[in-house]
Image (cartoon, grey):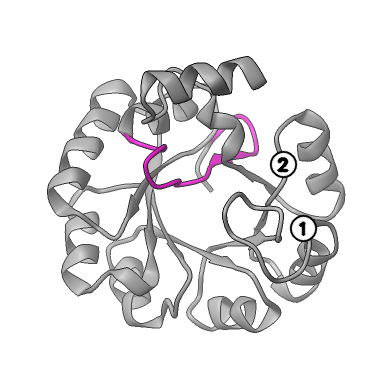
């Protein structure tokens, strides 16, 4: 779908996944997503500019669905990303606009009801996020949740998310039927992450 070399997608983490990190992941053969959170348009324009300057490969933008409006999606579409990801909320109000722009709609889900809703709005990629995902508790664990979503996904690719931080986790996700993995916290321990120097140093020491 994206022509990437490795089935790895950067989680669009707020305060971490800016344009530079997204570009680095894309340059490394994955798909980088900018964590645009609540949709600050000025911030988004700056970070998308950084991504475009650093890579010619596909990258995308992720939003908190409950925190944005139509104007935010308009601003994102104008940036011409390869994908727009919506998390934590009903994607229906924005799905048609993303589809009409020819941009891949990704929807992150934490329950089977949310997964069915994502398929109803014709999400092209569904991210099955287990309870191990950093900072987002509740719901089922990744190991049982991913195959449950895969079973109802038909031909729609599913990404596994939550607790995946290395090649073993990626291999496990693929064995569960996922098309790849969305990885977040592990990428915090990178020079490209939007973290201050002290936090970055602590993460490097833990990695």
List x then y, in percent, for residue 25.
49, 28
Secondary element under disc 1, as helix, strand or loop, is helix
Q: Residue at x 80, y 46 (%)?
A: 174
- Mark 1 is surrounded, within 10 Å at the Cα level, by few (under 14), some (14 to 19) or many (20 or more) other residues, namely many
Q: Residue at x 17, y 37 (%)?
A: 46
List x then y, in percent, for residue 127.
60, 60
Name the side, left or right, on which 62 lies relative to 113: left
- Mark 2 is surrounded, within 10 Å at the Cα level, by few (under 14), some (14 to 19) or many (20 or more) other residues, namely many
Q: Quadrant of residue 147?
A: bottom right
Spatial CA span between label 1 and label 2: 9 Å
- Viewer-closest of 80 and 19: 19
Asked whether 9 falls inside the magenta stretch, the response is: yes
List x then y, in percent, for residue 18.
34, 36
Q: Which residues are magenta?
A: 4-18
List x then y, in percent, for residue 126.
59, 63
Tell me the quarter of the image containing the C terminus.
top right
Q: Which residue is mark 1?
A: 142
Q: Quadrant of residue 168?
A: top right
Where 116 sits versus 144, above or below?
A: below
Could you tell me what secondary structure mostly forms the magenta stretch? Answer: loop
Q: Which residue is mark 2?
A: 164
């Amino acid at each position: 779908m994206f022509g990437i070399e490795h089935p790895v997608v950067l989680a669009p983490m707020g305060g971490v996944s800016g344009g530079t990190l997204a570009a680095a992941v894309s340059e490394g053969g994955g798909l980088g997503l900018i964590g645009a959170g609540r949709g600050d348009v000025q911030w988004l324009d700056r970070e998308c500019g950084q991504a475009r300057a650093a890579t010619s490969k596909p990258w995308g933008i992720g939003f908190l669905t409950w925190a944005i409006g139509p104007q935010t999606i308009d601003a994102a579409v104008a940036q011409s990303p390869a994908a727009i990801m919506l998390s934590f909320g009903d994607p229906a109000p924005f799905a048609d606009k993303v589809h009409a722009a020819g941009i891949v709609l990704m929807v992150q889900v934490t329950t089977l009801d949310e997964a069915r809703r994502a398929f109803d709005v014709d999400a092209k990629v569904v991210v099955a996020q287990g309870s191990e995902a950093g900072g987002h508790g509740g719901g089922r664990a990744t190991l049982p949740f991913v195959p449950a979503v895969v079973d109802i996904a038909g031909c729609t690719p599913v990404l596994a998310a939550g607790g995946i931080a290395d090649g073993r986790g990626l291999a496990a996700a693929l064995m569960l039927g996922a098309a790849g993995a969305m990885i977040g916290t592990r990428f915090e321990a990178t020079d490209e992450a939007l973290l201050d120097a002290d936090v970055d140093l602590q993460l490097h020491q833990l990695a």
